[in-house]
Amino acid sequence: METLVHSTASCSLLIVIVNYRTARLTVDCLQSLESEVRALPGTQVVVVDNDSGDYSVEAIQSAIDQHGWQAWATVLASKHNGGFSYGNNLAIRPALQSPNPPLYYLLLNPDTQVRPGALKALVDFMEQHPTVGITGSSFEDREGKPWATTFRFPSIWSELDSGLRLGIVSKLLSKWVIARPMTEEAEEVDWLPGASMMIRRQVFESIGLMDEDYFLYYEETDFCLQAKRAGWPCWYVPQSRVMHIAGQSTGVTVQDTIPKRLPQYVFNSRRRYFVKNHGWLYGAIADLAWSIGYSLWSVRRVIQRKPNTDPPYLFLDSLRNSVFLKFRSN
């Protein structure tokens, strides 16, 4: 059985970091949290190791002991890798069931480093806006260059746009394009990445924990949608800055590298999102819209002699995993 080294019952903020074979990055993330935790009394951090099968648990625990972080940091070793939702729920569930559950829960990726004041900015915003259920940080790379972190919910039109990749069509469908323009002001958005997402306790009490039938990808999109339907909006807080190195556990979203074939769970999650939230027919139309758009893009790419930067077998894998051939949502 997985056990916590110490109780999180009295903390006002619980930070959950789900690690999978990224021990060094996790330690760097904890290092960046040290001063932030001191600035927010009552903060606890739980590192959930998702059955890495390597030295992660020992290395992270050793760093906690060496740096004297035992008062606020704990390692929780899972015997099963059930994915991102599963790992987060493993730490959040007992905290919610404690006599004095935390007020706020921050999902934080191990490949992040929080900038000064990042956590306080999210907590302050939550305190000042009690009807907001979820807040998220702005992301930047190692050099401080920002990248998109505010998004719209996926739809039939966004699927057509992502497949077609034609500027004039993207302009016409601008209200549905998933990536939103980022601003320097806090604003309501559809969803934010789970790499730095703060959730009010009442959201979990309203809609439950994250859906563990998603292994990876779309789980935070789904969670934000359920929260919005329950009356808990999601807000982007750019004053909370977090450095994020994408795709370190999976390799799927690593930038500046040769694309790899997408793993099966990406297609499973996408299909589950559409069928669960909009029904089989909507999912089928979304699949058809993407397929038509991508086919037209492929022809245009050949005619214009554009390089193919897509993951290998993308079209074939998408067809194999469409709701036309797989009727279940997962």
Image (tube, rainbow, N blue to C red):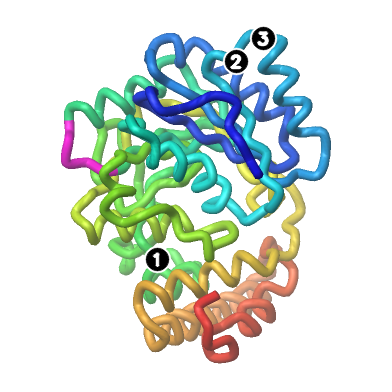
Give yes or no for residue 132 being in the magenta stretch.
yes
Circles 2 and 3: CB distance less than 8 Å? no
Mark 2 lies on residue: 70
Mark 3 lies on residue: 67
Question: How far across and how far down the image is residue 268, in percent?
Answer: 58, 71
Residue drawn 56% across the image and 18% down it: 32
Q: Which of marks 1 and 2 is nearer the N terminus?
A: 2
Viewed as shown, does residue 213 lie left or right of 256?
left
Residue 114 visible in the snapshot: yes
Mark 1 lies on residue: 154
Q: Residues within 10 Å of mark 2 (few under 14, many from 20)?
A: some
Q: Name the main secondary structure of what is drawn in magenta.
A: loop
Give yes or no for residue 281 being in the magenta stretch.
no
Q: Quadrant of the N terminus?
A: top right
Question: How far across and how far down the image is residue 56, in percent?
Answer: 76, 33
Question: How far across and how far down the image is residue 330, in percent?
Answer: 55, 75
Residue drawn 21% across the image and 27% down it: 127
In this rendering, which labeled residue sits more in front, label 1 or label 2? 2
- CA distance for labels 2 and 3: 8 Å
Task: Point out the stretch of residues depicted in magenta.
Answer: 129-133
Residue ranking furthest to the right: 54
